[in-house]
Amino acid sequence: MPSDPTIRVRIAPSPTGPLHIGTARTALFNYLFARHTGGTFLLRLEDTDVARSTEAFEKDILEGLHWLGITWDEGPGVAGMEEAGPYAPYRQMQRLPSYAAAAEQLLNADLAYRCYCTSDELEAERHAREAAKLAPGYSGRCSTLNSAERAARESEGRRGAIRFRVRPGIVGWNDMIRDRVEIDTANLGGDFVIVRADGNPLYHFTVVVDDMAMQISHVIRGEDHISNTPKHILLFEGLGYPLPVFGHLPLILNPDGTKMSKRKSQTAVADYIAQGFTREALVNYFAFLGWSPGTEEDVLTLDEIAERFELDKVQKGGARFDRERLEWLNGQWIRRLDDEDLVERLLPFTDASFAAGQIERRPTADEVRTLLPIVRERIHTLAALPETAGFLWRNTVAVDAAAIVPKRWDAATTVDGLTAARELLAGHDAVTWEADELEPPLRALVEARGWKAGDLFMAIRVAVTGMTATPPLFDVLVALGREQTLGRIDAALALLASA
Ligand code: GLU
């Protein structure tokens, strides 16, 4: 792939919540754009909202992105790696002097001014505007204070916030995804605060100062930021920096087309990881949230996606999150992983199931590896293994007497069938306990008695697993072993006798 040192993109998460699928998708598209063009991808933590930012969220975001394989060329350290890059530090709270300097520059150029309005005054102004049916916004009351008036307010002990002067007119840009976007600055709510009275710089300001400092060439982020972009453009102009190229990605929507919310939708990446989605399937799926290669290909590695990825092919309309498709993709990836890798990824899920008391025995890596041929195609998530094969790791299975009796059979036929089957199975020893040895005698039995194989096999299946849907029966019996199989058939017969 080409190399272009002028292309620099970033993901700038705020550690005010766990890694959100929207952030992961935006990070991925930036990463893919950088990989495809040979540019640089950096991560910056926007942690100036001190009250809501936590170290735990920061860790969740950094480790989540790293786990997905969306790695940054510059940014904070993760997983034992050090912070790296020529524009460190990559945490905004460690960059406060640069915001102070930029604010000073704007004040000196009279592109920003101190505003001494108290919150009560602003509140009163808000009510007055509401009553007059004016759009919400700052009136600009402090914008014309002269130095004597400012000095008078400061001598009262007022610490002014810093507001940026919004110039009248249209702000427009050629968006990589949405084409031409134009917004009248009259709709921006008036001169906006860039530094609070307590000295804390705010998002619109820090994002621009850092994008300048870090030489960001393309700002690729969610469509929810479109209304912020004009403010950023004004700030870039004010600070005298050439505008980056903007690209606004479509929103991720619920399957019914409504907006996602933390309450209604599963938005934390950690929850998908906990449910047994693989990183390959997640990045593969996230890439398809708004983009497609324009071919029939759907199962692609991160490298393959990076090769094909074109930002201007990203769709404008919202991208519906389709969990079924994600599960299907996950199943595809589970089929593609090599045995050792898959076993290693499955064990934490069987361990968790053991810890939760859902299974009574922890399967070993060897046991899980042996099972792969019969379970791999049946599980869509890693967490589904203990659901699909958990009967192997319980001492007994909960069986419902009624469920053992196949639909076309009555209890007496079922007892008859299970007794005869048990006798044939008991005739095998450990050496002949193999699927192709166990099956023919049972088929011959069915034939001789005029039964249907499906009925006898279902009765045996339910007796030994407690479930009606399992991997192929004879593979199940082999995995269970002779003693467990016979013991469970005996238990089922005892249950039928007492029912
Ligand atoms: N910290 C902002 C966010 O998390 C970054 C937005 C941007 O990319 O400019 O939404």
Image (cartoon, rainbow, N blue to C red):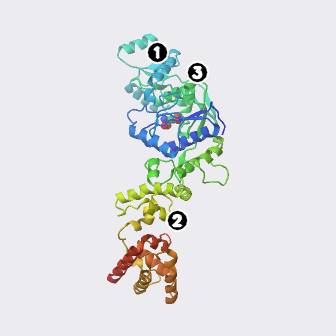
Residue 44: mark in rendering: none
Mark 3 and 1 residues: CB-CB less than 8 Å, in contact? no
Percent from the top left, x then y, of residue 342? 50, 56
Sequence-earlier tag: 3 or 1: 1
Residue pointed to by mark 2 = 373
Residue 145: mark in rendering: 1
Q: Relative to residue 284, is residue 423 drawn left or right?
A: left
Which residue is at 51% across, 67% downward?
A: 374
Mark 1 and 2 residues: CB-CB less than 8 Å, in contact? no
Residue 240: mark in rendering: 3
SS assignment at label 2: helix
Which residue is at 48% across, 81% downward?
A: 455
Which residue is at 45% across, 61% downward?
A: 366
- From what the image shows, is residue 117 above or below residue 348? above
Sequence-earlier tag: 1 or 2: 1
User: What whole-number distance in Å separates the C-alpha atoms at marks 3 and 1?
Assistant: 25 Å
Q: Who is closer to the viewer here, 376 or 343?
A: 343
| Amino acid, disc 2 | Pro
- From what the image shows, is residue 373 above or below residue 452? above
Percent from the top left, x then y, of residue 277? 49, 53
- From the image, state whether disc 3 or disc 1 is nearer to you: 3
Percent from the top left, x then y, of residue 332? 56, 58
- From the image, state whether disc 2 or disc 3 is nearer to you: 2
Percent from the top left, x then y, of residue 313? 65, 44
Q: Residues within 10 Å of mark 3 (few under 14, many from 20)?
A: few
